[in-house]
Image (cartoon, grey):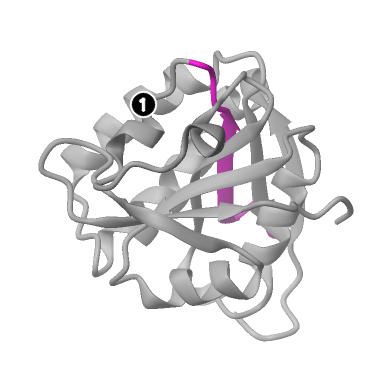
Amino acid sequence: MSQSAQFSIERLDGPAAAKAEGAFRLVYAEAFAEPPYGETEADVSAAFRRFRSQTRKGAFAGALATTDDGEPVGMAYGFPLGPQTVWWDELTEPVPDDMRREDGRRTFGLMELAVRAPWRRQGVARRLHDTLVSTTDAQRVLLNVRPDSEAAVASYRAWGYRKVGDARPWPGAPLHYMMLLANKPQDV
């Protein structure tokens, strides 16, 4: 895509995101097939079984970037972390109780953020991120990112995230950085 290519971003609630699952899946499958992820079709299928469940959460929020003709460009989604979240338990070293306290409103968990290769380095990821997190009432945003995804780590740091620890988000997972944005953007 040329640097002058146009795209728009739409914020979606759970039911709308569920209807747009094909677009979310296309972006996810393409972006996460690349190194360092190397996700297979089986991995994508598992991710979208979780996606269907996640879109049913009342506070689910998604953002989808598309071209004027509807071609999916990028996507992001997440939801507030509830009191019983296991995210903080996945850290390799514990953090203080006041940091890990969740009430279903305090922290927005950014589950996924991806942009298709031809559209990278055009501000799509940042606009997706800001569209998504600026519309939540959460005080902060939490995410996991693989350290070998250097471009993503650099972007998150540039956007104000700080690493709070190392995590293994599922059994057998590679090490991830858990990163926190304490003062999320208020305006897009």
The image shows residue 116 at horizontal and vertical percentages of 48, 64
- Image x and y of residue 81, in percent: 54, 26
**In the rendered structure, which segment of residues is drawn in magenta?**
66-83
Q: Residue at x 24, y 69 (%)?
A: 35
167 or 98, which is in the foreground? Answer: 98
Q: Residue at x 66, y 68 (%)?
A: 159
Residue at image x 46%, y 69%?
152
* Looking at the image, residue 164 lies above or below residue 91: below
- Confirm whether the magenta stretch covers residue 69: yes
Q: Looking at this view, is 76 or 102 the one in front?
A: 102
Residue found farthest to the bottom? 3
Which residue appears at 75% of the width and 39% of the height?
11
Is residue 45 magenta-colored? no
**Quadrant the C terminus occupies:** bottom right
Task: In this rendered view, identify the residue nearer to me: 95 or 32.
Answer: 95
Q: Residue furthest right?
A: 187
Quadrant where the image shows the N terminus: bottom right
Q: Amino acid at mark 1?
A: Val
Instruction: Please provide percent x and percent y for residue 178.
Output: 41, 52
Q: Check disc 1 and report the residue beneath it.
A: 86
Q: Position of residue 91 (x, y in %)?
A: 30, 43
